[in-house]
């Protein structure tokens, strides 16, 4: 990670555009000049920029199914987390697990035929179609948009149920406080400029609602000179780890019993002046011939086992509008 920081800082000082991808454990970060992505097995598509050479949309019917993880395995991890929460070691932890999926699309086909704010495909290793911004930096301001709280949009009174759910409110407030504290490490004049607004996302299973907030702060005018150091100080992303962050990450490793790798890491690009980045969620990876969809949810003192188990399965979706 130290090498990544040095290279990023050097690119920043030179105002040289670059792409980056950092894994959750910060053990295998990637960084390269932006133009190098065209030949390096990286394809990305953001709402504002992409490096796509050729569109490869297909018209075949989309087939998708999954095999839920064993309830008892989830329960084991969940109860360990709840013990730590009751002991005061954490008050919010994002617990994640892989789900085996079956589909007739390749990872590359999934990349080109899904709709998402941020998409990434890496060397046939994984595809990510993330709705969540990590940080955005523009005009010496840094913005973060933590996303916490999800509900099936087809449920009766779905909006109201989500916005008034006490567990979801508490979880969202915790993440907003955590991100405010994180941004204060690198910026000043931190403000919550939008609080708990609704976004609607389309999936192959139907629509879902999610809640996000906007938090911003003011950076020094020469922030590009320390861009690598700045990113490192904010990792891992608060919304997919928890609070307090350092201790919670230790508990995550105990409960999940496997590395996350690039899942729940961050990826983005610097264009010479501004930075755009995303959290690597809504993520399918390839292990041998098996596809795994990784998903998770925030566990708090108010969490119930069945609800949290169902939430990680609810998030196993692909943002393709029709089957």
Image (cartoon, rainbow, N blue to C red):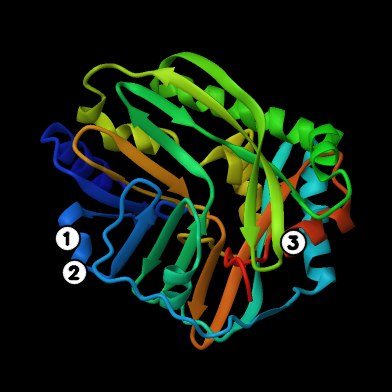
Give the mark nearest the N terminus, 3 or 2. Answer: 2
Q: Residue at image x 40%, y 61%?
A: 120
State the image quarter where residue 256 is shown.
bottom right
Percent across and percent down for residue 78 are 79, 55
Residue 235 visible somewhere in the drawing: no
| Secondary element at image label 1 | helix
Gap between marks 2 and 1, in whole Å?
6 Å
Seen from the viewer's position, the closer of residues 105 and 220 is 105
| Secondary element at image label 2 | helix
Residue at far left of view:
14
| Secondary element at image label 3 | helix
Q: Which of the labelled discs sits on residue 318, or is there none?
A: none
Seen from the viewer's position, the closer of residues 24 and 216 is 216
Gap between marks 3 and 1, in whole Å?
37 Å
Residue at mark 2? 39
Q: Residue at image x 65%, y 78%?
A: 100
Give the mark nearest the N terminus, 3 or 1. Answer: 1
**Mark 3 residue crowding within 10 angstroms, few (<14) / some (14–19) / many (20+):** some
Q: Residue at image x 53%, y 45%?
A: 132
Q: Is residue 124 left or right of residue 30?
A: right
Q: Is residue 41 left or right of residue 160?
A: left
**Mark 1 residue crowding within 10 angstroms, few (<14) / some (14–19) / many (20+):** some
Seen from the viewer's position, the closer of residues 205 and 177 is 205
- CB-based contact (under 8 Å), mark 2 and mark 1: yes
Q: Is residue 53 left or right of residue 48?
A: left
Gap between marks 3 and 2, in whole Å?
36 Å
Residue at mark 3? 314
- CB-based contact (under 8 Å), mark 3 and mark 1: no
Residue at mark 1? 36
Q: Is residue 142 left or right of residue 203?
A: left
């Amino acid at each position: 990670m130290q090498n990544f920081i040095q290279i990023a800082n050097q690119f920043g000082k030179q105002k040289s555009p670059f792409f980056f991808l950092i894994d959750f454990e910060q053990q295998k970060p990637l960084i390269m000049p932006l133009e190098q992505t065209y030949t390096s097995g990286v394809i990305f598509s953001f709402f504002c920029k992409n490096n796509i050479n050729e569109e490869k949309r297909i018209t075949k019917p989309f087939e998708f199914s999954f095999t839920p993880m064993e309830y008892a395995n989830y329960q084991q991890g969940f109860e360990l987390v709840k013990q730590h929460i009751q002991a005061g070691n954490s008050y919010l932890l994002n617990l994640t697990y892989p789900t085996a999926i079956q589909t007739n699309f390749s990872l590359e086909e999934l990349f080109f035929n899904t709709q998402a704010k941020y998409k990434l495909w890496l060397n046939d290793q994984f595809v990510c179609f993330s709705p969540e911004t990590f940080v955005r930096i523009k005009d010496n301001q840094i913005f973060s948009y933590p996303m916490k709280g999800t509900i099936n949009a087809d449920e009766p009174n779905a909006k109201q149920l989500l916005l008034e759910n006490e567990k979801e409110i508490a979880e969202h407030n915790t993440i907003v406080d955590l991100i405010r504290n994180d941004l204060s490490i690198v910026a000043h004049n931190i403000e919550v400029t939008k609080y708990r607004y609704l976004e609607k996302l389309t999936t192959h299973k139907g629509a879902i609602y999610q809640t996000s907030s906007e938090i911003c702060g003011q950076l020094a005018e020469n922030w590009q000179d320390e861009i690598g150091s700045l990113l490192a100080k904010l990792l891992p992303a608060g919304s997919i780890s928890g609070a307090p962050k350092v201790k919670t990450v230790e508990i995550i490793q105990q409960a999940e019993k496997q590395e996350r790798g690039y899942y729940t890491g961050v990826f983005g690009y610097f264009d010479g002046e501004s930075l755009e980045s995303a959290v690597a969620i809504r993520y399918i990876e390839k292990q041998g011939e098996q596809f795994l969809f990784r998903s998770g949810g925030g566990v708090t003192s108010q969490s119930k086992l069945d609800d949290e188990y169902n939430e990680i399965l609810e998030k196993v979706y692909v943002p393709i509008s029709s089957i």
